[in-house]
Amino acid sequence: MDAWIGLGSNQGDRLFYLSRALWELSTIGSLRLASSIYETTPWGVKEQPAFYNAVVCIQTNLEPLELLGRLHRIEEQAGRQRDIPNGPRTLDLDLLIMGGILMQTEFLTLPHPRLTERDFVLAPLVEIAPLLKHPEVNLDMQTLLPKASIKTLSGNILGWDGKPVERVV
């Protein structure tokens, strides 16, 4: 099943955290699509550094809650702290859409409940899957994205070649 995952980082070596997350994601599923990296202003807490954001699609056999647990472990390995809601973070991995699944539990809502409000997720989705339908509102990503002014940093997420990027010190 295809799982669409949003990646974000605004602390430390942002490119390292995104590339490492991409490598980790490749160990739990087959990477199908990856967007450019976008530099975006913070959402929620405004007094923090800009984010680097991207979206990837992996094909996985994991169930949604199992995949969410794996995403949280990848975040924890990157030093993610959850002490300030919408605050600064080394790595943020959001499960956006998984197949056509609609679900709401204490731990996970699919599709992501704020997907349609966040240009930093919609812009990368439009780049790689403009006709992907939002499973709940049944509109494609290009229809959901208003005119966005988000800066693209690269033509492909790190020119990823399947190997982890080493931290540059």
Image: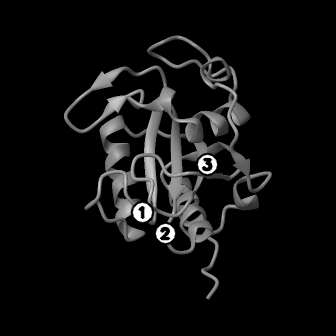
Q: Which comes sooner in the sequence, label 2 or label 1?
A: 2
Q: The residue under label 3 is which amino acid type?
A: Ala
**Residue 95 vertical position relative to residue 152 in the rendered view, above or below:** above
Which quadrant does the C terminus fall into? bottom right
| Distance from the alpha carbon under mark 1 to that under mark 3 | 15 Å
Which residue is denoted by mark 3 in the rendering?
A: 54
Residues at circles 2 and 1 in contact by the CB criterion of under 8 Å: yes
Q: Residue 81 bears which disc, if any?
A: none
Image x and y of residue 38, in percent: 67, 50
Percent x, y of residue 143: 65, 17
Q: Nearer the viewer, residue 74 or 85?
A: 85
- Give the side of residue 53 with respect to residue 64, left or right: right
- What residue is at 31 percent from the left and 65 percent from the top? 81
Q: Residue at x 51, y 74 (%)?
A: 12
* Residue nearer the viewer, 155 or 123: 123
Residue farthest to the left, as pictured: 106
Which residue matches tag 1? Answer: 89
Question: What crowding class fits label 3: few (fewer than 14 Cα within 10 Å), some (14-19), or many (20 or more)?
Answer: many
- Mark 1 or mark 3: which is in front? 1
State the residue at coordinates (53%, 51%): 7
* Relative height, residue 144 to residue 54 (above, below): above
State the SS at label 3. strand
Left or right of 112? Residue 81 is left
Callout 2 secondary element: loop
**Amino acid marked by disc 1:** Arg
Mark 2 is on which residue type? Gln
| Residue to which mark 2 is pinned | 11
- Tell me which numbered mark, 1 or 3, is placed earlier along the sequence: 3
Using the numbered discs, state the Cα–Cα distance from disc 2 to disc 1 in whole angstroms. Answer: 6 Å
Q: Is residue 29 left or right of residue 162?
A: left
